[in-house]
Every structure is written in C-alpha cells, then in structure tokens.
Amino acid sequence: MNENRSKILIVDDNLINLKLLEMWLKKEDHEVITAENGKIALERAVGENPDIIISDILMPVMDGFQLCREIRLDRRIHSTPFIIHSASYLHKDDEKLAIDAGADLYIRKPIKRRKFLEIIERTLVEYKGKRSKTANSDVAEEETF
C-alpha cells in the first residue's frame, strides 16, 4: 500500500457530487468511503476511522453542521480533520457557522479538481504531522514517567 494513501470519508446526498469526488480522490490513490447523509457518515467514521472527512451541509436525516458537532463530541474521532464542501451555503456567516461547529475548512462548490486536491493534500499533511507529533510526545511522557 502507498504510504501517502489516506482513508477519506465523503458525505453528500447528491450522487453525482459523491461520485465525482470519489473519482478524483481514487485517481490520487486514496481509499474512499462514502455516505449519503450525516447519520450513516457518523457510523462509518467511528467504524472506519478516516484520515479526513469531507461533507456537504444540506442533507436529509443529519446535516453537515450536526455531523461536524457529533464528530467533535466523539473522543474516538474528534480530532479528524473535517471539511465542509457546499454549494448551498455561500455567505460568510455560513462559513463562520461551519467553523464554529468545528469544521477545519470550508470549501465552496464548484471548485476545480486541482485546487480541491491541493486543499485535501495540504490538510492531510498537516493532520498527519500533528498526529505523529502527538504520538511522539505521548511516548516521551511515558518514558519520563
């Protein structure tokens, strides 16, 4: 398996959007998990422990804002980077609401493939760097103890 390969959860009730992102990410050799709404996504996030979550906002059953809040409350997955990817909520106040709910980034649809992939890769690099620093500091603390 490619060491740069990441597990990415995409959440969108629009099948065309879901398949488009899935195709873009698989072409970059990422493992992709999909969900049609926030409730299914939450179950898959807990079970699969993705490296990043990319979610639409406007969905049935559980919207992206609620999904983000639920992710942040679950200690097993609370530190997973969460990106809102939306065409419905485009006002600055909507972006602030997403960030206040716990989202790391807010991407407006439509977006060009290259720009989208750059954002995802940069986020993954930052997250994996933070995760390895945390793991190393945990080891250091245990050794000191």
Image: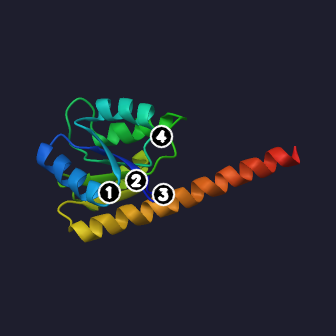
Label located before the other in sequence (4 or 2): 4
- Numbered mark located on residue 95 in the image: 1
Quadrant (top left, top right, bottom left, bottom right) of the C terminus: top right
**Marks 2,1: beta carbons within 8 A:** yes
Residue 58, horizontal then vertical, whole percent: 20, 42
Alpha-carbon span between mark 1 and mark 3: 33 Å
Residue on which disc 3 sits: 3
Label located before the other in sequence (1 or 3): 3
- Mark 4 residue type: Arg
Residue on which disc 4 sits: 72
Foreground mark, 4 or 3? 3
Residue 51, horizontal then vertical, whole percent: 45, 48
**Marks 2,3: beta carbons within 8 A:** no
Residue 60, horizontal then vertical, whole percent: 19, 33
Label located before the other in sequence (2 or 3): 3
Label located before the other in sequence (1 or 4): 4
